[in-house]
Every structure is written in C-alpha cells, then in structure tokens.
C-alpha cells in the first residue's frame, strides 16, 4: 500500500496542472455512475448491517501532503 500512496503523491506533485485537468476531463463522467462513498456506506449499513468506515478528510490530507 505504501508504494501506491507514494506513487499517487508523486503523480500529483510532479504532474503539470494542465495534464491533471486533461486527465480529469477524460474520466469525469465516471463520477456520475453509481453511488458515492457516503451513499454506499449508508446502503451497506441499512441493508446488511455492515459498517463501512470512510473519511474523505483522511484521503484529502494524504493527497495534499
């Protein structure tokens, strides 16, 4: 897992903003498919009693370092 995190951090730190914007434009439509993480976690809890831990604060903090 450490290599994936380091790879993502390196990508966001070294890739020019124009390329990041272009990469995002290519996959942005995927953001509208299926539930988001909060909806999914609620669905799992309500229907199966499974608590799915999530925190967008942790993800943002890691990627912004």
Image (spheres, grey):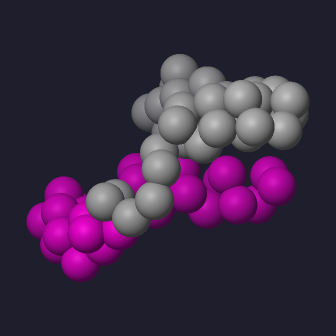
Relative to 62, residue 30 above or below? below
Give residue 24's position: percent from left, percent from top. 26, 65
Q: Please tell me whether the stretch drawn in magenta is mainly helix, strand or loop.
A: helix
Q: Report if residue 52 is visible in the image.
A: no
In front: 26, or 13?
26
Is residue 48 shown left or right of residue 53? Answer: right
* Numbered marks: total: 0
The residue at 30%/73% (across/down) is 27
Quadrant that contains the N terminus: bottom right
Is residue 15 shown left or right of residue 8? Answer: left
Q: Which residues are magenta?
A: 1-30
Q: Quadrant of residue 20?
A: bottom left
Give residue 30's position: percent from left, percent from top. 35, 68
Give residue 8's position: percent from left, percent from top. 55, 57
Relative to 56, residue 14 above or below? below
In magenta segment, residue 17: yes
The residue at 45%/59% (across/down) is 34
In magenta segment, residue 7: yes
């Amino acid at each position: 897992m450490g290599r994936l995190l380091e790879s993502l951090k390196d990508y966001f730190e070294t890739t020019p903003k124009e390329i990041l914007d272009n990469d995002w434009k290519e996959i942005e439509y995927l953001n509208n498919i299926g539930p988001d993480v909060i909806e999914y976690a609620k669905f799992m809890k309500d229907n199966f009693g499974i608590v799915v831990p999530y925190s967008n604060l942790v993800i943002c903090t890691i990627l912004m370092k």
